[in-house]
Image (cartoon, rainbow, N blue to C red):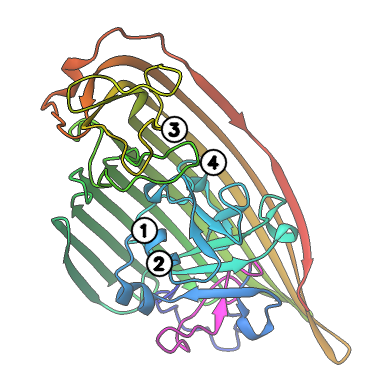
């Protein structure tokens, strides 16, 4: 259940109860895949019927039934959301035609530091639901939110003692185990531990492994106060593959080279991301006169390190049955994949393709920190009720990376030979290319909500 909490201590006699609900999404009234409230659309808990935006909520039940492991698995069921051209494992999604430049990732209604690296690439073991808000939302979330918002709602400790174990098996040697342990220590204190381990393969033979560790602790001394802390570790280690499709000068895709054929050495090529995130938060509700106040302060720090191995195709040699290199009408050896074949594209007249390659090894990472403060005022004005949100966000980020390139042996497309130790085949190293950047903005905002 989204943001369900440990049962609070009972109120003292004569004490006025002010409930925490401005920033808490309760799924008690959800029925299967149908949700009643959302957090990301207005930055506060709002009934969907009162939300003037197009909001699609993927509930906890839906995420379970669909077996979604990453955002692409879940978002493919939502109209207007597509995988961006950069590939599934980056997690980049396009919403109403905008990719990472116009689709911003949020967590619990707040900007997510993790999205600064790898876009929306993450495992969903720690999430209770996903909210997809379509259309421009710059008033609340900045000018970069042209296509919409993807808001992730975190799992929090429940008021029940329970343990859930889930084992998943699938195609391409996929095995995955999820463990979710929830324990209320007493009426005020509770914790939750989420673990996940996955081992699998890509359809062409590369690996696809994941690991998630996330403990959460929440303390509620009374019904109007909540304090929590969260740690999250994720490791995504998977093989990447450059496309093996070839096109002619009109970009007609070939049908004679199978897509499952890899032009890279499977033991070497890939992406290894390690993410560590820390979060501490406080929520407080109180009343002064006729005004109900709700305050939330959340601090976050995340760090990510990555290492990528990318294989570049520098040139192509098309060889016929006699072993000779095919030439074009100008009698020049054809060396690019987008070319007009002398014999016509449908019958190119070659029996093999020799691909010259180079390898790029990139290591780097970065850190991201943020402080979010939200204040909600709920008050009557004559016969009507009004709600106003005032918020401030301060965050900073730092990133750096280094790239080193090597010459690498060529490969025969139709008769590939892969190396057990590809690193030993690297030659002619080229200089590193360091890249470093920083970003430290401050956002302020005010919004009336009725």
Mark 1 lies on residue: 70
Q: Is residue 401 above or below residue 146?
A: above
Q: Is residue 173 left or right of residue 398?
A: left
Q: Quadrant of residue 297?
A: bottom right
Decide which of tag 3 and tag 1 comes sooner along the chain. Answer: 1
SS at mark 1 in the image: loop
Mark 3 lies on residue: 340
Residue found 78% across the figure and 61% down from its top = 446
Question: Real-space Cα distance between discs 2 and 3?
Answer: 41 Å
SS at mark 3 in the image: loop
Q: Are marks 2 and 1 in contact (CB under 8 Å)?
A: yes
- Asked if the stretch drawn in magenta spans residue 369, the answer is no
Mark 4 lies on residue: 369
Question: Real-space Cα distance between discs 3 and 4?
Answer: 52 Å
SS at mark 4 in the image: strand
Please provide the residue range marked out in magenta: 20-43
Main secondary structure type of the part rendered in magenta: loop
Residue found 13% across the figure and 28% down from its top = 417
Decide which of tag 4 and tag 1 comes sooner along the chain. Answer: 1
């Amino acid at each position: 259940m989204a943001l369900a909490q440990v049962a609070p201590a009972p109120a003292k006699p004569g004490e006025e109860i002010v409930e925490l609900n401005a920033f808490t999404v309760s799924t008690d009234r959800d029925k299967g895949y149908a949700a009643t409230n959302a957090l990301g659309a207005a930055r506060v808990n709002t009934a969907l019927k009162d939300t003037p935006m197009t909001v699609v909520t993927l509930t906890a039940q839906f995420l379970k039934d669909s077996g979604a492991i990453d955002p692409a698995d879940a978002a493919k069921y939502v109209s207007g959301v597509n995988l961006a051209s950069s590939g599934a494992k980056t997690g980049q999604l396009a919403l109403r035609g905008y990719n990472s430049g116009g689709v911003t990732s949020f967590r619990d209604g707040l900007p997510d530091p993790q999205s600064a690296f790898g876009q929306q690439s993450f495992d969903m073991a720690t999430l209770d639901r996903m909210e997809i808000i379509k259309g421009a939302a710059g008033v609340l979330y900045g000018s970069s939110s042209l296509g919409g918002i993807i808001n992730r709602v975190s799992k929090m400790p429940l008021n029940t003692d329970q343990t859930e174990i889930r084992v998943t098996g699938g195609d391409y040697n996929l095995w995955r185990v999820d463990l979710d342990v929830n324990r209320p220590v007493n009426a005020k204190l509770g914790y939750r531990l989420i673990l996940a381990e996955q081992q699998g393969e890509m359809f062409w033979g590369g690996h696809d492994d994941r690991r998630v560790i996330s403990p959460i602790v929440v303390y509620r001394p009374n019904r109007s106060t909540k304090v929590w802390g969260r740690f999250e570790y994720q490791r995504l280690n998977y093989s990447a593959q450059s496309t093996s499709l070839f096109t002619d000068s009109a970009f007609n895709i070939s049908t004679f080279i199978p897509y499952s054929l890899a032009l890279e050495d499977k033991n070497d090529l890939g992406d290894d991301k390690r993410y560590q995130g820390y979060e501490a938060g406080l929520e407080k509700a109180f009343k002064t006169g006729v005004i109900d106040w709700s305050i939330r302060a959340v601090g976050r720090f995340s760090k990510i390190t990555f290492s990528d191995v990318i294989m570049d195709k520098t040139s192509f040699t098309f060889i016929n049955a006699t072993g000779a290199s095919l030439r074009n009408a100008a009698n020049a050896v054809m060396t690019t994949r987008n070319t007009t074949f002398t014999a016509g594209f449908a019958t190119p007249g070659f029996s093999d393709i020799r691909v010259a390659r180079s390898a790029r090894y990139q290591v780097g990472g970065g850190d991201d920190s943020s402080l979010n403060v939200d204040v909600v005022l709920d008050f009557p004005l004559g016969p009507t009720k009004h709600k106003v949100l005032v918020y401030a966000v301060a965050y900073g980020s730092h990133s750096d990376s280094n790239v080193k390139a090597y010459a690498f042996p060529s490969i025969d497309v139709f008769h590939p030979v892969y190396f057990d130790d590809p690193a030993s085949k690297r030659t002619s190293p080229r200089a590193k290319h360091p890249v470093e950047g920083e970003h430290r903005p401050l956002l302020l905002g005010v919004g009336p909500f009725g």
